[in-house]
Amino acid sequence: MKKAFFLDRDGVLNEEGDEETGVLFEPEKVLLTPGAAQAVKKIHEAGYLAIVVSNQGAVALSWYTMEDVYAVEKRLCELLWQESGHAPDAFYYCPHHRKGVIPEFSTYCENRKPGPGMLLKAAKEWDIDLSSSFMIGDRLTDMQAGINAKCSQCCFVLTGHGGKDEEKVRQEGFTVKNTILDAVEYLLNKYKENGECH
Ligand SMILES: [Mg+2]
Ligand SMILES: [Zn+2]
């Protein structure tokens, strides 16, 4: 079986968009967070998959479309490739939202984090052992999704929305790091010490 780093997208690999709404849908506005490209490279070099799991409920709210989501993904991958020669292995999205206005997307969905659905689907499709995999995110709901999928450990980062949920996440005992690169290095070092083979 394989092992993976599950990564939230917005606020973890790329900066959040517009300051007020946090909405990002224009590819030309994609900016990497500090260390994002090196983080993906380190994940791959350590023998893990890099799998993105991203709530995109704004699609249900009609703020933007799935075409916009894919355009941002394409630009994000270009930027990561340019900097480190590595990009995520797969992207999973949940476009659903209970309070949406687009009928086909306006429903409760177990894939929407904190639900574990996207991680479980990826695990099935990629033959991933969740108990030796990790989740990195900038929201409490990212941490909960990782727990619900029974990942080995979840790590919170302070980029993106990180500041908003920091207190709650610390109270619940999650490890907090400044950036995705710090989180990846921390997790790789920690689980190397525990005698994992390379
Ligand atoms: Mg996020
Ligand atoms: Zn969904």
Image (spheres, rainbow, N blue to C red):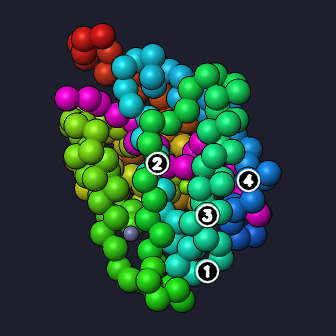
Task: Say what amino acid the circle numbered 2 marks.
Answer: Phe
Q: Which of marks 3 and 4 is nearer the N terminus?
A: 4
Residue tagged 1: 62
Residue 12 part of the magenta-drawn span: yes
Residue 47 placement (x, y as % from top left): 36, 20
Q: Residue at x 59, y 56 (%)?
A: 70
- Estimate how packed mark 2 is, as few (under 14), some (14 to 19) or many (20 or more) residues with alpha carbons within 10 Å: some
Q: Mark 4 falls on what kind of element?
A: helix
Q: Which quadrant would the N terminus be assigned to in this image?
A: top left
In this rendered view, identify the residue nearer to me: 56 or 103.
103
Residue 26: which quarter of the image? Answer: bottom right
Q: Mark 4 vs ligand 1: CB under 8 Å?
A: no
Which residue, given by chain and number where applicable, does mark 4 sit on?
Answer: 27
| Residue topped by disc 2 | 91
Amino acid on which the number 3 mark rests in the picture? Glu
Find numbered disc 2 in the image and state the secondary structure of the residue it sits on: strand
Residue found 48% across the figure and 69% down from its top: 95
